[in-house]
Image (cartoon, helix red, strand yellow):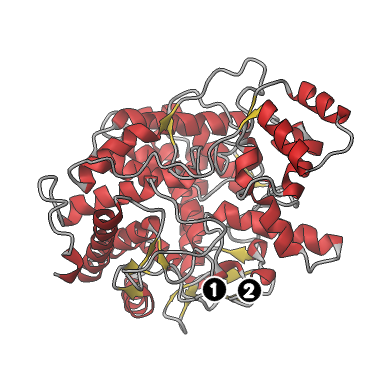
């Protein structure tokens, strides 16, 4: 597969100088900078600077790089008449286009994509994998098939070029992927293409993604060793986990990672710590008590020891798509294989991840074989994919409503750890997964309650601040969401997408009256 160098590889000495001097408040700023000269020339000039200090390095960076703004406000309200028209306006502001890179370095860390793509907003200046699925939900309601098609084409391009879809289209993300939603994205092509046409065009990409996660060889029909796959029982398909091929501080979170690792002196322990941080980023839940061994403290992060319920459900859906494709093309060997795998995967999820004690689906620690007790919104994924039994779905609804439902929607977890994927925060993608999951089992009252509380919170914040945000405080609806490594961002792709999709289902507001009632939460 194609090898692309990241900033720390292209100009390592300068990278460490910049990060060690902490030139920018956000570690991501420098690694997003665009080179103004060839990296060899930059490295050569740096070597001539002898007595270096913070000011000299900052001046050097300014002369050799186009530095992005650390705080951009492109996505704020600009006098549109309603939240819906604001979202329609935002689609256009989020579109980016790659420029040709004949020499391979012109855009710095930004990876080339053949078609226009969408960024989420705020500090995120690139296209993100799992974000895009939830953005597509809204693009469909807006009739923007052109943008949906472009996103899918770009992801297929990345699969064919790199063997997986990176976390985002940056060279420093080429060591990990994100939750695999590509097979779900293809469903949105159904109004324009037949299933056979879709699989003819993108079937190879689906196979590449499945092999990346599981190590499956489509020639031998066997699972080969793969760092992301764990064989808990050799008679069953492998469990999958989040993984990153590197065990060093993240380039986009260098300063933060070193701070977290400071108490660790043993090199092997530090390397594992950094890999677990990176694996948590691959999950999209960066960061959460969900990945902490003690359920509270960052120092106990052990992401790579965990088989997550959401990821294993996503792999089930990918296997289901491969079974559908094999059936359409009458590939009997693959049909037989994936029929068996489908049955085994359902049994595994229903047994291994279902907790009778918690009456909910939970994650599984395979390094110290046991279920993890924490209740998280990821528990809704088996309902979203219709894997849960009727009994499991009904009990899940009771547990989720009791443990996670708040005034503004669903909590991510019950834990107040200070991390952004914990209480009191709620996130758009998890609201959608929960609502659709409960609808699948006829639990309509809870689905509607979650949807309306989330929609009303989004509308309340928009009417007061003119923004759609990355995340929301669902406990105290008058207070901002917080936690994590950076401030709450506005824009925001998946929030916009889920708002339009849920509003289409539950009709909270129309285009005509969406900004009339700023006190809708009190109604």
Q: Residue furthest front?
A: 55
Residue displayed at 82% across by 30% down: 46
The residue pinned by badge 2 equals 297
Q: Answer whether labels 1 and 2 touch (C-beta < 8 Å).
A: yes
Name the residue nearer the viewer: 456 or 329.
Answer: 456
Asked which quadrant contains residue 2, the reply is top right
Marks 1 and 2, how far apart at CA: 7 Å
Residue 139 lies, with reference to residue 373, above or below; the image says: above
- From the viewer's perspective, tell me whether residue 169 is left or right of residue 491: right
Name the residue nearer the viewer: 283 or 483.
Answer: 483
Coordinates of residue 64 in the picture (x, y in percent): 69, 27
Residue displayed at 19% across by 46% down: 82
Residue 51 lies, with reference to residue 389, above or below; the image says: above
Can residue 385 be seen from the camera position used here?
Answer: no
Can residue 453 be seen from the camera position used here?
Answer: yes
Local secondary structure at mark 1: loop
Coordinates of residue 406 in the picture (x, y in percent): 32, 74
Q: Residues within 10 Å of mark 1 (few under 14, many from 20)?
A: many
The residue pinned by badge 1 equals 417
Coordinates of residue 25 in the picture (x, y in percent): 61, 50
Asked which quadrant contains residue 485, the reply is bottom right
Coordinates of residue 97 in the picture (x, y in percent): 46, 25
């Amino acid at each position: 597969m194609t090898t692309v160098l990241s900033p720390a590889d292209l100009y390592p000495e300068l990278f460490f100088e910049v990060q060690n001097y902490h030139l920018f408040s956000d570690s991501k700023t420098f690694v997003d900078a665009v080179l103004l000269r060839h990296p060899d020339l930059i490295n050569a000039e740096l070597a001539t600077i002898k007595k270096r200090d913070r000011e000299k390095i900052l001046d050097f960076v300014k002369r050799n790089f186009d530095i992005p703004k650390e705080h951009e406000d492109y996505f704020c309200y600009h006098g549109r008449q309603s939240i819906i028209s604001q979202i329609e306006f935002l689609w256009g502001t989020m579109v980016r286009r790659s420029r040709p890179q004949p020499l391979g370095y012109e855009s710095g860390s930004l990876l080339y994509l053949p078609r226009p793509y969408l960024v989420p907003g705020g500090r995120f200046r690139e296209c993100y994998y799992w974000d895009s699925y939830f953005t597509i939900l809204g693009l469909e309601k807006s009739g923007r098939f052109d943008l949906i098609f472009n996103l899918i084409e770009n992801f297929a391009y990345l699969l064919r070029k790199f063997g997986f879809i990176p976390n985002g289209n940056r060279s420093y993300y080429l060591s990990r992927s994100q939750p695999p939603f590509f097979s779900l994205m293809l469903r949105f092509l159904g109004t324009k293409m037949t299933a056979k046409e879709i699989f003819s065009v993108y079937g190879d990409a689906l196979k590449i993604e499945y092999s990346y996660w599981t190590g499956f060889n489509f020639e031998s029909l066997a699972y080969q060793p793969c760092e992301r796959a764990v064989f808990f029982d050799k008679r069953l398909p492998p469990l999958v986990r989040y993984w990153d091929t590197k065990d060093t501080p993240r380039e986009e979170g260098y300063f933060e990672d070193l701070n977290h690792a400071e108490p660790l002196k043993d090199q092997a322990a530090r390397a594992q710590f950094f890999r677990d941080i990176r694996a948590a980023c691959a999950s999209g839940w960066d960061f959460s008590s969900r990945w902490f061994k003690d359920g509270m403290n960052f120092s106990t992060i052990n992401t790579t020891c965990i088989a997550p319920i959401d990821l294993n459900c996503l792999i089930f859906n990918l296997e289901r798509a491969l079974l559908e494709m094999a059936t359409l093309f009458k590939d009997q060997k693959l049909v037989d294989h994936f029929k068996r795998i489908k049955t085994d995967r359902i049994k595994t999820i229903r047994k291994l991840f279902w907790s009778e004690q918690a009456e909910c689906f939970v994650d599984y620690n395979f390094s110290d074989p046991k279920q993890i007790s924490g209740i998280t919104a990821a528990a809704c994924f088996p309902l979203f994919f219709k894997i849960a039994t009727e009994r499991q779905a009904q009990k899940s609804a009771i547990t989720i409503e009791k443990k996670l439902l708040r005034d503004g929607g669903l909590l991510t977890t019950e834990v107040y750890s200070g991390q952004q994927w914990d209480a009191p925060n709620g996130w758009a993608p998890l609201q959608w997964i929960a609502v659709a999951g409960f609808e699948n089992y006829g639990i309509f009252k809870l689905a509607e309650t979650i949807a309306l509380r989330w929609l009303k919170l989004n509308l309340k914040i928009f009417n007061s601040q003119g923004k759609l945000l990355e995340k929301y405080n669902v406990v105290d609806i008058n207070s901002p969401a917080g936690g994590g490594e950076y401030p709450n961002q506005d824009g925001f792709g998946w929030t916009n997408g889920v708002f339009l999709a849920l509003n289409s289902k539950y009709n909270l507001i129309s285009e005509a009256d969406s900004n009339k009632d700023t006190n809708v939460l009190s109604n």
